[in-house]
Image (cartoon, rainbow, N blue to C red):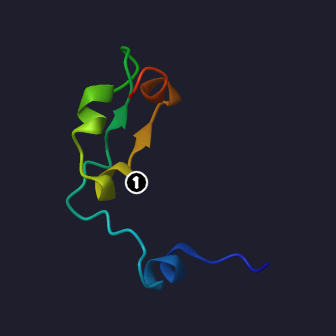
Amino acid sequence: MKKLSRSKLKEIKGATNCGGCPVQNNYGDGPEYSASCASYFSLSQNCQMCVDVSADCFENWN
């Protein structure tokens, strides 16, 4: 299987577009995170795919 560069991945139809998403944040509960789990779940599904999130956010999520 051939690896694709990031620029080639962006060209794939249906690739996630992260424009306007707060990609600088990392989400989780605790002082080491810049935003909370609640903030993560308030993002659009598109933006949720673009940001770093702790697995802890999914432990108590319904």
Report the number of discs: 1
Q: Which of 8 and 13 is in front in this view?
A: 13
Indicate the secondary structure of the residue bearing disc 1.
loop
Residue 17: horizontal and vertical position, in percent? Answer: 33, 69
Farthest residue, direction front = 62
Pinpoint residue 10: horizontal percent, then vertical percent. 44, 78
Name the image quarter holding residue 36.
top left
| Residue occupying the point 30% across, 37% down | 40
Which residue, as the protein is rendered here, is positioned at the far top?
A: 31
**Does residue 59 appear anywhere in the picture?**
yes
Q: Which residue is drawn at 20% across and 59% down?
A: 20
* 59 is higher (above) or lower (below) than 2: above
10 Å crowding of disc 1: few (<14), some (14-19), many (20+)? some
Q: In this view, does 21 lie to the left or right of 60?
A: left
| Quarter of the image where the N terminus is located | bottom right
Q: Which residue is labeled 1 in the image?
A: 49
Residue for point 31% across, 63% down: 18
Q: Quick one: which residue is furthest to the right in this view?
A: 1
The answer to whether residue 34 of the structure is visible from this angle is no
The amino acid type of the residue labelled 1 equals Met
4 lies above or below 53: below
Q: In this view, does 9 lie to the left or right of 48?
A: right
Position of the C terminus, as image quadrant, is: top left
Task: Give the x, y percent position of residue 2.
Answer: 75, 80
